[in-house]
Amino acid sequence: MKELLNYSQKHKEQLINELFELLRIPSVSADSAYDKDVATTAEVVKDALIKAGCDQATVYPTAGHPIVYAEKLIDPNLPTVLVYGHYDVQPADPIELWNTAPFEPVIKTTPKHPDGAIFARGACDDKGQMFMHIKAVEAMIQNDLLPCNVKFMIEGEEEIGSPNLELFIKEQVDLLKNDIILISDTAMIDNTIPSIDTGLRGLSYVEIEVTGPNIDLHSGTYGGAVANPINVLCDMISSLMDENKHITIPGFYDKVIPLTAEEREELAEAPFDLEAYKKALDIAEVQGEKGYTTPERNSIRPTLDVNGIWGGYTGEGSKTVLPSKAFAKLSMRLVPGQDWHEITELFINHFNSIAPKSVTVKVTPHHGGMPYVIPTKHIGYRAAAKAIEKTFGKKPVPQRGGGSIPIVALFEEVLDSKSVLMGFGLDSDAIHSPNEHYGVWNYLKGIDTIPYFYQYYSELYKAEN
Amino acid sequence: MKELLNYSQKHKEQLINELFELLRIPSVSADSAYDKDVATTAEVVKDALIKAGCDQATVYPTAGHPIVYAEKLIDPNLPTVLVYGHYDVQPADPIELWNTAPFEPVIKTTPKHPDGAIFARGACDDKGQMFMHIKAVEAMIQNDLLPCNVKFMIEGEEEIGSPNLELFIKEQVDLLKNDIILISDTAMIDNTIPSIDTGLRGLSYVEIEVTGPNIDLHSGTYGGAVANPINVLCDMISSLMDENKHITIPGFYDKVIPLTAEEREELAEAPFDLEAYKKALDIAEVQGEKGYTTPERNSIRPTLDVNGIWGGYTGEGSKTVLPSKAFAKLSMRLVPGQDWHEITELFINHFNSIAPKSVTVKVTPHHGGMPYVIPTKHIGYRAAAKAIEKTFGKKPVPQRGGGSIPIVALFEEVLDSKSVLMGFGLDSDAIHSPNEHYGVWNYLKGIDTIPYFYQYYSELYKAEN
């Protein structure tokens, strides 16, 4: 692929101009006022895929926004890479906090991007990162260097939770058949510290209702004699973690696959500055499970957080009410080995079992997602790591993300293949916020790196098969 | 006073008609749409006091609704009774739940009132009970039987927390000088089980704010590593009571004046049906401080109840937020011996001391009130008990109320006199609710009983002075 090493520099102006065109279309999936723009964007992406040299490209309608599919199949004996990305963007609100118009891309320098960054909604998440793949594949096809088959699935509803993607992939299992899925929709630690996300946490999200007396009571007349559902809810929630912030639900940790000492060491290589972390959040102390570091607590360990709580009188002033009901929304982040259906059931059973007889408790499962992990010895991970080492001159650090991308676990379940999360953004790129941007250096470096992934992946694949 | 024993029966029709006139005016203090009606009611009350034979009656304007004052001073050597009551009423909402128009009084029988009850907003709370005093004094004056001086202070803002009463009584200490305050604004156990409230709980009401990180965080990226202020708030609230529902704030119980065994026995005479209590509230079990009965828990013991709690995402669906802040409104009911200012300070100090370093905590005192008690050997209580025994043929049961009427403690503080809470309503009279009513029997029995209070009080006063 060394023929392509100068490709992005040579075509820099054109690569930026084409991305600018894509960024100018406000493809906000959450707001129906932009439905036409979303549809236009799907067509623009389709055209780019055809221009890149794909044999065919199709805009598949869904119950919501369409999915663009394209493919370039060169040899059934070669492995197939499925590129996933999305062309929709978050709303630009609050617009008044943008320094430049969100859909008028401009290049400005930042401390993290001394060579300039493209400021626009979607620059990093995910138009810029998705477009790198189209342009890298174009470069390989034009130079007759494509070493695998390639398929593209670019959706338009990622920012609203991909409501129609599951049905699509279940209906199109054959069409989407692949050996590895490649996604650039995450961040790396720093331009000088490349990293690859090797896992994501799963999720079990429940809603709790605690009922005491059948009506709101006067806290003077009844206080002290009748269980207050808010106090009871606090007691019950408090009991879910012990003083070491270990979750007390029986069986909760049973299926957690512990990391090897080697894996923990590998993860610990990622630089982390605790003082800077506390300062950024304006907290005097961190808090978490005993025996684990802060980066471990928010990535490789399961958690339990109340996401919302309400009950009684919450308006201005005071009301002396002993309420009939109290509510909470609570979620648990899960790690590999934990099945979210199982954990939800464990939670419900435990929560019911600890309820005092003075109240009744109802737990409703909201939604969930499976944890995901790709071992660092998987050839998909190894191909990405080698590609990055080649173009960055540095081995990437494996990183576990604390969040959840349920579709990645879904891809594994339905399509039976692993996803490689090779992101080129930075956490400081302000995705979902005003003044989103994406480094020009990162954009071009991505276009240079991706062809090496194809090369190394096809080599490793051949060696293994 | 035996001359008056037939008074209420003889004048029954007129007594009811005059009360009906008062009930027809919608003197809702909380809603400015009724301001004119509230003002009219003050004038009607003033006229009734003049008709009753008071030497003078005045409508005192305040920053809100006016206070009606009247007096009949017959001899500076005789004791002075100050009657307190209120002419304002609660809003009638929800109006659709009323079976008859709330401001069109009608008489209908109920299981508790086989002789008929007057259905109207304010029938019991407090127009009916307040008007008994005007008519009883009228009967005594007309028959030249008034044995004491009498003063009336009838306010129009009780249902909105008496915001202008404190200033009025502080400015009018001389005008309001008295030996005993007489109030009918409470309930008795049953028409066949008369009772007198001997005490009320005090109150300390605070608002709590717990701050974790300086902004709302993503619970995936930060969950497990950063203290969640909702979880912390639950932990802190939960720790405020132990497994025996004993409050854990150091010093909280230090100044509680314990009841004597005799006083507890006296209170235990009031009938109480635990099964009926649980059934009415639809709860399987009561819950409260170990070592005390349900009637004791909600009257003679201090309590701690969360009246409201909120934080994070409380809308429909789910949001995976680790919020920056969590809030609660919390109140403690206090018993004689406890000073609400002191308890508020103890709470604030304790709550700050148990806060983990991962959060900051702010406790804001809202308002409070002192507990109140009148000993059963006080001549005010004894006069009321004798009067009730005379007309009901049964000794009343002393009862401690669980609620708070801060003005009663205020009267004691500013005017230096005890209040006798001689209520003739029933708990089933639906005050503050749709279909409020007041038994005709109770109304007339009150008018018959009040003159005996004056007689016995003046006799006991003379014997003591």
Image (cartoon, coloured by chain):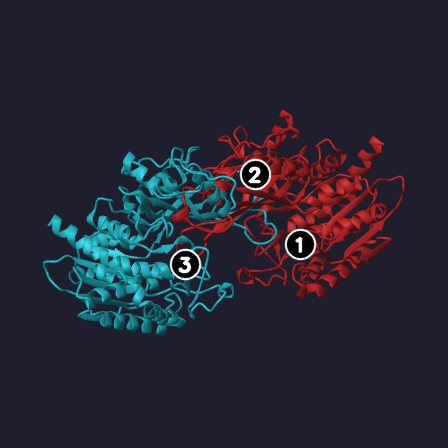
Chain colours: A red, B cyan
Where in the figure is residue A69, as x and y percent of width and height? 80, 53
Image quadrant holding the C terminus of chain A, namely: top right
Give the labeled residue for mark 3: B431
Which badge, 2 or 1, comes first in the chain's sequence?
1
Is B457 placed above or below A416 here? below
Report whether residue B205 is seen: yes
* Residue A160 badge: 1
Q: Quadrant of residue B66?
A: bottom left
Tag 3, which secondary structure? loop
Residue at coordinates 65% horizontally, 55% vertically from top-left? A123
Q: Find the distance from the CA under tag 1 to the CA under tag 3.
A: 50 Å
Three-letter residue code for mark 1:
Ile
Is B386 placed above or below B2 here? above
Is A205 placed above or below B429 here? above
Three-letter residue code for mark 2:
Leu
* Residue A304 badge: 2
Mark 3 belongs to chain: B
